[in-house]
Structures are given as C-alpha cells and as structure tokens.
Image (cartoon, helix red, strand yellow):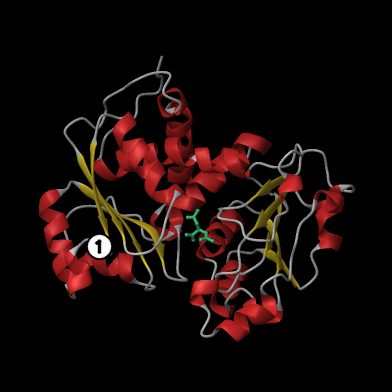
C-alpha cells in the first residue's frame, strides 16, 4: 500500500503532493523547528550495499520527525551467516513499522515488499530503480526552475547501470521533459527503458558527445560509471574517464542551468565546477532529508500539515 518500488507507484499528482509536503517540512529538515509526526514509529534501514547519503538522510529524516531507526547492514548481521532475504525480511516485519532497502540485486525491493506487511521503500535495487532519489532530484529541479514541466534535461555517464537515471528519466518524461542521453555506446540507456520513455511521448536524443548539448540544457545530470556492476575491470577501464565536466565547459550554458549529481562523484565532475552558480549537487543531497520525511509520512499514512511554523 505505502510501498515505493518504482516511479510507477506514484501518479503525477501524488508526486506534486509529496514535493509540496517536503517543502512544508523544510524548517524541520534544517533543524529550525521540531514536529514529532513520527513519534513511536520505527524505521528499518536495511543496506545490503554501500551508502552514505541515502542511509544518513533517511535516518536524519526519521529522527527529526521524532521516530526511531534500526540499522542493518550486510557486515555484522546474520546475512553474513547466509540468512536469506526472505527470512531477514520476516524479522524486519516484526521489528519495524516501515523499511528502506538497498540491495545489489535488481528486483530485491519488490521481492521484499511481497514478503512482508510493512511498507517498503526502494533505496536502490542493483541496476534497477532508485525512486526516493528521483523524488529528491525532482524537488531540486523544481526548487531551481519553479516547475517540472517541459525541461531540457541532459543525462550523462553510465545510463546502462545507473539506476538513478532509470527512475528519473521515467518521471521527467511524464512531465514533458526533452531528454538528451549522453553515454558511451556500451553504457547506453537500456532499450526497454528508452521504449517506455518513447511510449510516454518523450523526445529523446541519444549521443556519445557531451559538450555540444550544454548550451541548450536546463539541467545536466552527471553520473558515476558504476564500476561495481561491470563484469570485469578491463571493460570498466575502457570507459572509466570518458566524461569529465569542467568549469571551462560551461561558458555557453544558460544562466539558470543547474548541474546535478546523485553522488558519489569520481572523475566525471571536476571540483572547479563546485564554485559555479550552476552547481546544485550538495543542495540536492541535503534535499534528501525533507523529501524522505515526506516519503516516510506517506508510507506510514501520516498526513503532513499544510503549514509548519
Ligand atoms: C547513487 C546510487 O546508489 O545509485 N547514489 C545515491 O544514492 N546518491 C549513485 C551512485 O552510486 O553512483
């Protein structure tokens, strides 16, 4: 019911409602106000794969709303003894009211949701989806551009294994975005995703070349080449440093163009971009807190008041 596995679980109207709720919760996310909407509730934070931002922002979101957090990771739990995901989820079902799961296998979040009664939020399933990231990405885009409608968005890097781009591209085309998908040939957006985007009427341009599209972009969404998902290191090395966005590439960019990145970055985004007015990735990471607050409230069926003082 309150699950969020892919962006298909949310209508456009619900997306806007969640972004509005996140906006209302901003003072609480910043620690300027306190509202224990989730007092007495327990979040199971289940990370079977590395995470900094997603894990910490869910934990902060829960705590700033007065809730409690149980953390489970592969190291230090019975997962290391060979316990199955199904059995682990039965425990989580009993110990918490809602759970966030990140897992290296595509489909693991849906599998978990099917195995338990509590709501499950997918925090990244292999090369599949990452819908809670998409919600904070949409929050960041709307914060900068005032609307989600009809934007010109470039996605750059590993579009094959990059789950953030899978979920975000789907959501953006539902709001009429025009997409320029920039990747090496071997890391193109999977064909079934491109067909899905086209079936929503999207205008899509697939290219290997980054620089020439910068001047018309409203958003540039950079991504890391997903080393851990490559079958072997040689294949990774062939494409490791293929895109490197540098401040000097931005001379023709629109003033209001924003640069985003789900982070962590490797070499694809030079630190000299950080001090430009286009850089929004650290703000984007912070936006995980209010957005995930709103998603936790949705999952638990708790209404967010229209106004927080
Ligand atoms: C992303 C992920 O885990 O998919 N990170 C994140 O959640 N902010 C991106 C990545 O790992 O490259």
Residue 209 appears left or right of 306: right
Q: Position of residue 119 (x, y in %)?
A: 24, 52
- Report which residue position mark 1 lands on: 113
Q: Secondary structure at mark 1?
A: helix
Quadrant assignment, res 171: bottom right
As drawn, the residue found furthest toward the front would be 76
Residue at 42% across, 32% down: 21
Report crowding for label 1: few under 14, some 14 to 19, many 20 or more residues within 10 A (C-alpha). Answer: many
Quadrant assignment, res 17: top left
Residue at 24% across, 34% down: 67
Residue 309 appears left or right of 196: left
**Label 1 CB sits under 8 Å from any ligand 1 atom:** no
Q: Nearer the viewer, residue 197 or 160?
A: 160
**Residue 56 in sight here:** yes
**Residue 84 in sight here:** no
Q: Nearer the viewer, residue 226 or 309?
A: 226
Q: Quadrant of the C terminus?
A: top left
Residue at 84% across, 47% down: 253
């Amino acid at each position: 019911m309150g699950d969020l596995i892919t962006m298909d679980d949310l209508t456009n109207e619900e997306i806007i409602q969640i972004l509005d709720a996140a906006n209302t919760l901003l003072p609480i996310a910043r620690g300027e106000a306190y509202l224990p909407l989730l007092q007495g509730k327990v979040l199971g934070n289940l990370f079977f794969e590395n995470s900094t931002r997603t894990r910490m922002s869910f934990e902060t979101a829960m705590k700033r709303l007065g809730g409690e957090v149980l953390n489970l990771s592969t190291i230090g739990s019975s997962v290391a003894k060979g316990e199955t995901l199904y059995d682990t989820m039965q425990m989580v079902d009993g110990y918490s009211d809602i759970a966030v799961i990140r897992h290296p296998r595509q489909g693991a979040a849906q599998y978990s949701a099917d195995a338990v009664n509590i709501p499950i939020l997918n925090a990244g399933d292999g090369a599949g989806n990452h819908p809670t990231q998409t919600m904070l990405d949409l929050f960041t885009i709307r914060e900068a551009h005032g609307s989600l409608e009809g934007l010109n968005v470039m996605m750059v890097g590993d579009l094959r294994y990059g789950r953030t781009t899978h979920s975000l591209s789907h959501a953006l085309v539902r709001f009429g975005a025009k997409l320029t998908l920039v990747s090496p040939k071997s890391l193109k957006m999977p064909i079934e995703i491109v067909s899905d985007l086209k079936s929503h009427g999207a205008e899509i341009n697939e290219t290997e070349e980054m620089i020439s599209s910068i001047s018309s972009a409203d958003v540039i969404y950079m991504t890391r080449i997903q080393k851990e998902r490559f079958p072997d290191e040689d294949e990774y090395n062939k494409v490791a440093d293929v895109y490197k966005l540098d401040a000097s590439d931005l001379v023709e960019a629109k003033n209001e163009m924003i640069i985003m990145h789900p982070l962590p970055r490797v070499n694809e985004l030079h630190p000299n971009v950080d001090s430009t007015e286009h850089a929004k990735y650290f703000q984007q990471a912070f936006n995980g807190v209010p957005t995930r607050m709103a998603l936790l409230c949705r999952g638990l069926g708790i209404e967010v008041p229209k106004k927080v003082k």
